[in-house]
Amino acid sequence: MTVVHDNYPTRLDHAIAPVPRVEPAVWGEQVHGPLGEEALASFAERGYLIRPNTVGEQWLPPLRQELERLAAELDADDPRVIREPGGGIRSVFEPHLLSDLIAEVVSLDTVLPIARQLLCSDVYIHQARINMMPGFTGSGFYWHSDFETWHAEDGMPAIRAVSCSIALTDNYAFNGSLMVMPGSHHTFYPCVGATPSDNHATSLVAQEVGVPDRDTLTKAAAQFGIDQFTGPAGSALWFDANLLHGSGSNITPFPRSNVFLVFNSVENELTAPFAADKPRPEYLAARHYQPFGE
């Protein structure tokens, strides 16, 4: 695997200052896709965008049924199935390869063209999963930047990836919906602590490595504030790969589930990991892929 210059050092043995972002947050222009100038400018500044009606009402019941089918049919020891500490299913990875319906969602006019526009290139799925946060027992995700993990453990060289989280249930302020720090994507926050061997086996349940310390998060929250993604089922949250985000646990009776798609530019192919002894498995970081053709 190719080794390239590391613009974003992390997983260090000592703390260093935050690193200003090198790449733009938006690569394309209005002529490259469906987003207008205002939406592109907002994404560039804040690092996220909410798009209502990304999937219509007719999609929601069959998609929920697909989640239930996958959860029921996959073997308990399938590594793509991540379970909560209490035993319930937390995530299922590679759903677009397991379900024709979910694969169809990826190519919707409300999804794929936006990814291409934001990244101004052809794209592929770096990672996909369905997240399930059942009522009463769904646990949260601690504050982190996805790019920090993808850079350290997958060898993603540049911040030229974007995530699309499509809500399959209503997102309320009280059922563990995603929180973001708008504008934090302009800064990379190096983390302290070496990557343990096979870190992915535990980090997908409770992430402890590759997260900013509390002092860093306190300063970031004071600088950027915290927004929350709420809205009806069918809405989508698009957010930059480097945006700080997290979610609390769901102690309400109202479940929260979503389809989570990560698009990477074909011009940003993975290299050797920057801070891990070996790459993560293919279902977490695709190295063999088929780009979406124009």
Image (cartoon, rainbow, N blue to C red):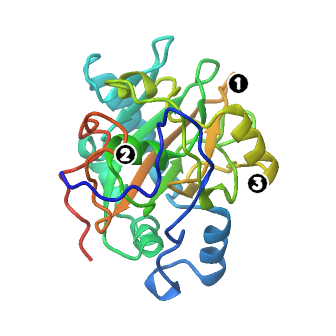
Which residue type carries mark 1? Thr
Image coordinates for residue 225, horizontal then vertical, percent:
79, 50
Q: Residue at x 42, y 21 (%)?
A: 202
Image coordinates for residue 97, horizontal then vertical, percent:
24, 45
Q: Quadrant of residue 246?
A: top right
Image coordinates for residue 136, horizontal then vertical, percent:
64, 19
Question: Which element type, helix, strand or loop, lies under badge 2?
Answer: strand
Which residue type carries mark 2? Ala
Residue at image mark 1: 252
Which residue type carries mark 3? Phe
First in sequence, mark 3 or 1: give its number. Answer: 3
Instruction: State which mark lies toward you, 2 or 1.
Output: 2
First in sequence, mark 3 or 2: give its number. Answer: 2
Q: Residues within 10 Å of mark 1 (few under 14, many from 20)?
A: some
Is any atom of residue 49 visible in this view? no
Q: Quadrant of residue 259?
A: top left
Q: Residue at x 42, y 31 (%)?
A: 91
Instruction: State which mark lies toward you, 3 or 1.
Output: 3
Residue at image mark 2: 128
Q: Is residue 75 left or right of residue 10?
A: left
Q: Residue at x 61, y 70 (%)?
A: 44
Question: Which element type, helix, strand or loop, lies under badge 3?
Answer: helix
Q: Nearer the viewer, residue 234 or 212?
A: 212
